[in-house]
Image (spheres, rainbow, N blue to C red):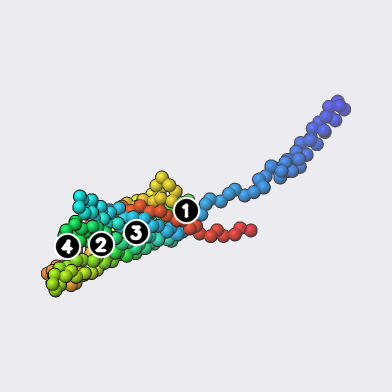
Amino acid sequence: MPLLAHRLRVFALGIGLLPALAAPARAQTAPTAAPPASAPSPRLLLKSGLRLTHLFYLPDARSWQLLLPISFGLEYRLRPRLSAYAQAEADISAGRAPRGRRGSPLLPTPGTSVSLGARYYFNQPAEAQASPEPWGNYVALEASAELAQLSSRRGRRGRGLSVGRVTPALFALCGTQHRGPSHRLLYDLNAGLGIEAPPAYSAEAGTRPPWDVAAQVNLRVYFANQHHAAKASQP
């Protein structure tokens, strides 16, 4: 009996020491570094490329015609789902007239446009750090102004005159912007309806309504450069 009582006292003493022995073990196995934070979402996106829906090239046996539409864009993320953007685009035309003929070949009308708008990415999560990539499906509201250079033969002695035409417009667009095979390559496809104002100095200015309904489809391919927001320092 004394031996049994002694063993019970040793067992009870061991049970009482278990919490004290477990505390240092937990302190040693605790992680020494905080888990890595998720990558910050890009705030500024710079884009340069081509507006492929305006690309035109027509070779001929005696002449050729080319319209090269360059596009530059800037997009800034206000929120994970909302961004503001600006675009500047220009159509560069070139060509070669057939030999033995005066004048230049009939080229597509070159133009320059400037656009401002806002996009809402409806398939992006709302959390600030849950969407590290600046692409997805979106709806947009865009205001634009296009300047086109028209050719005329109404001058004296048959000389051509260059006439400019400004067309302001407002469009509602639905599209998608995604990454291509390369990390810096983006393609942007959108389509929509809107209203545009015909030029006030056109021949039909007195009979046409102040606004015309118009549609557009755009496919752009960009090389993009992303700029991330600065991360706040942690204590």
Give the secondary structure at mark 1. loop
Q: Amino acid at mark 4?
A: Arg
How far is disc 3 from disc 4 in space, using C-alphas? 33 Å
Residue at figure coordinates x 76%, y 36% from the top left: 15
Q: Which mark is residue 102?
A: 4
Given contact means CB atoms under 8 Å apart, are the residues at marks 3 and 4 in contact?
Answer: no
Q: Residue at x 27, y 60 (%)?
A: 93
Amino acid type shown at disc 2: Pro
Q: Which residue is mark 1?
A: 127
The disc, 2 or 4, on the residue closer to the chain's N-terminal end is 4
Q: Are marks 2 and 3 in contact (CB under 8 Å)?
A: no
Q: Where, by quadrant of the figure, is residue 234 drawn?
A: bottom right
**Disc on the earlier residue, 1 or 4:** 4
Q: Nearer the viewer, mark 3 or mark 4?
A: 4
Place of residue 142 in the rendered image (x, y in percent of width and height, measured from the top left): 31, 62
* Image spot of residue 134 (x, y percent): 43, 53
Element under disc 3: strand
Q: Which structural element holds mark 2?
A: loop
Which label's residue is closer to the chain start, 1 or 3? 3
